Amino acid sequence: IFKYFDKKNVKKYEKFFKKYGQSAMIIMAVSPIPYLPTLAGVFRMTSPILITKVLVVRMIRHVVVFLFWFYILTQF
């Protein structure tokens, strides 16, 4: 991992994931920043419950975005 990322940033994110755990993953699943969940995988934050929560939250996010754009585009 240190080959691709700065060591200081890796330590910062590792501390962040240890402090906030699954709550951080659920919040990041809603964010448009795709590499943060990838970093969680690198730090071995894997569990079936966590993966399920993240998938559900990401699906909800995508449905909301779709409905928003569908509404906007059907108005014109």
Image (spheres, rainbow, N blue to C red):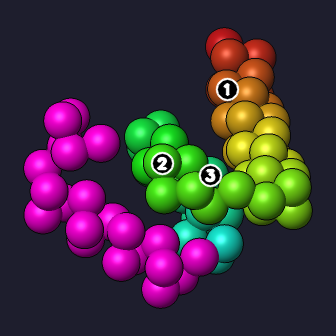
Pair 1/3: label in front: 3
- Residue placed under numbered mark 2 in the picture: 42
At 56% from the left and 48% from the top, the residue drawn is 41
Pair 3/2: label in front: 2
Measure how far apart labels 2 and 1 are at the Cα level: 33 Å
Magenta part of the chain: 1-21
- Residue placed under numbered mark 1 in the picture: 69
Determine crowd level at label 3: few under 14, some 14-19, many 20+ residues with C-alpha closer than 10 A.
many
Query: Magenta-highlighted stretch: main secondary structure?
Result: helix
Determine crowd level at label 1: few under 14, some 14-19, many 20+ residues with C-alpha closer than 10 A.
few
Q: Secondary structure at mark 3?
A: helix
At 14% from the left and 56% from the top, the residue drawn is 7
Name the amino acid, label 1: Trp
Residue 49 at x, y percent in the picture: 87, 62
Task: Reply yes or no: does residue 15 show up in magenta.
Answer: yes
The quarter of the picture where residue 1 lies is: top left
Left or right of 51: which side holds 3? Answer: left
Q: Which mark is residue 29?
A: 3
